[in-house]
Amino acid sequence: MQAFKYHSVVKENGIVEIPKIPLRKGQKVEVIIFPENEEGINLTEASESSLKFWDNSIDNEVWNNV
């Protein structure tokens, strides 16, 4: 799946504009809106920033022996 990420500001009447995207005319797309939280923390990036939590040898041993 191909993904594009743009930042925008909601304008009058709820209008959101994005720049020209590199897709063909008539191609169907799905648009998902993530409002920025007030703290300015991008929760999506934070959740993807580290997977070290899952690299735990003790947990792996216990889980594998269940």
Image (cartoon, rainbow, N blue to C red):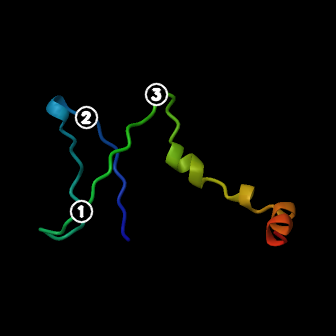
Position of 34 with respect to 24 (left or right) is: right
Single out the mark in the foreground, 1 or 2: 1
Which quadrant, please, contains the N terminus? bottom left
Q: CA distance from mark 3 to mark 2?
A: 15 Å
Amino acid at dot 2:
Val
Q: Amino acid at mark 3?
A: Glu
Q: In the picture, residue 26 is in which quadrant?
A: bottom left
Instruction: Give the residue number, with chain letter if any, for mark 2.
Output: 10
**Residue at (51, 29) in percent of width and height:** 39
Is residue 58 left or right of 47 when viewed as pictured?
A: right
Disc nearer the start of the sequence (3/2): 2
**Which three-letter amino acid code belongs to the residue tagged 1?**
Val
Q: CA distance from mark 1 to mark 2?
A: 20 Å
Quarter holding residue 29? bottom left
Q: Residue at x 49, y 33 (%)?
A: 40
- Residue 38 - label: 3
Mark 3 element type: loop
Callout 2: 10 Å neighbours few (<14), some, many (20+)?
A: few
The percent coordinates of residue 12 (x first, y second) are: 16, 29
> Badge 1: how crowded within 10 Å, few (<14), some, or many (20+)?
few
Decide which of tag 3 and tag 1 comes sooner along the chain: 1
Give the percent coordinates (x, y) of residue 65. 84, 71
Residue 29, numbered circle: 1
Identify the secondary structure beneath mark 2.
loop
Separation (CA) of disc 3 from disc 1: 28 Å
Q: Is residue 26 left or right of residue 39?
A: left
